[in-house]
Image (cartoon, rainbow, N blue to C red):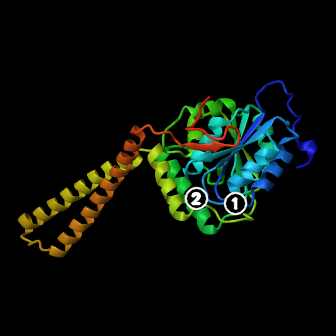
Amino acid sequence: MSPAAHPAPDPPDSDEPLISVTVPVYRNAATLEELCRRLRAALEPLSTDFEIILVEDCGGDASWDIIRRLAAADGRVLGVRFSRNFGQHYGISAGLDLCHGRWAVVMDADLQDRPEEIPALYRKAQEGFDVVVARRTSRKHGPLRRASSFLFAKAFAWLAHLPYDPRVGNFRIVSRRVVLAFRQMREGLRFFPALVEWMGFPSAAVDVVHDERTEGRSAYTYLKLWRLAVDAVVAYSDKPLRLSVKLGFALSLLSFLYGAVLVFLRLARGIAVQGWTSLIVSIFFLGGIIIFLIGILGIYLIRTFDETKKRPLYIIRETTRDGHADAAPLD
């Protein structure tokens, strides 16, 4: 994008940075320097008053050493290191808890989200939107990953009654009041896009280019994606429990009707009813359904139990500015 396409830089009339960029980092040592270089190039035409918050999620590579070096070279870069691996959406939460900007950008560190798209998101937000999401016109993922994302989006939208577009990820810009509202929601099950959608602030979408992954592999295995999907459904929908009630009622009704037919055949027509095989099959079928429904209930119970502990969402081991912190700070 040419410089002429950028909106005019905001005047430095506030102590707050214009834009804070939150980036969860997990095994992204190969892309961090290039990411910060491109972020500076994209943000400086808007304002030189910005901050970049890199939240290192204990990936075990050289990411933290690189973050410390980047922060030492540019005071606008803040590095945050967790005490252990908490997960991507907790990293996003930490960055938003710590940011000070009038606008906040959330993006990944692997450079598939292009920093050059931030000015377009910011320009759209100036039209009166509190949330502007980056809608990927062509996702650079494999067909199985795209298909699973599509199925999850449809299932999640149906179960949670929240719109969910599989072309939209975490990459977006949000206003300060969205950030402040987000900080009030401290439930342990974190799914950033759904939390923002649930707030209901005015939102818009901008079509962006989604780049190929040039370094490393995605930290999200299919098992991790499945766990995230289960957590998201449990956090935002009680429909599985309601469906289990309907399923139980339907099976009871069918069993009653089938029993009535057998009684009628025996009494009215004298037909002897035999069928040990069908009986055993029915027992195993119903037993499997009962165990499955108990499992659904158990998931909800364990998540409720976890919420009652009121533990912090994450623990910060150290930052590049003060050296250490005991827990998640809030404004």
**SS under mark 1:** loop
Residue under the point 71% across and 32% down: 100
Where on the picture, by quarter, is residue 257? bottom left
| Residue 154: image location, x then y, percent | 54, 54
Contact (Cβ within 8 Å) of mark 1 with mark 2:
yes
Q: Give the spatial CA distance, label 1 vs label 2.
A: 11 Å
**SS under mark 2:** helix
Where on the picture, by quarter, is residue 255? bottom left
Horizontal side, residue 286 vs residue 110: left or right: left
Mark 2 = which residue?
Answer: 149
Residue under the point 44% across and 47% down: 234
Residue under the point 46% across and 44% down: 235
Residue nearest the viewer, comparing 249 with 35: 35
Mark 1 = which residue?
Answer: 139
Closer to the chain start, of discs 1 and 2, is 1
Quadrant in which the C terminus is drawn = top right
| Residue 43: image location, x then y, percent | 83, 42
Whether residue 163 is visible to the viewer of this picture, yes or no, is: no
Whether residue 190 is visible to the viewer of this picture, yes or no, is: yes
Where on the picture, by quarter, is residue 268? bottom left
| Residue 28: image location, x then y, percent | 69, 58
| Residue 45: image location, x then y, percent | 88, 40
Residue under the point 56% across and 38% down: 326
**Residue type indicated by callout 1:** Arg
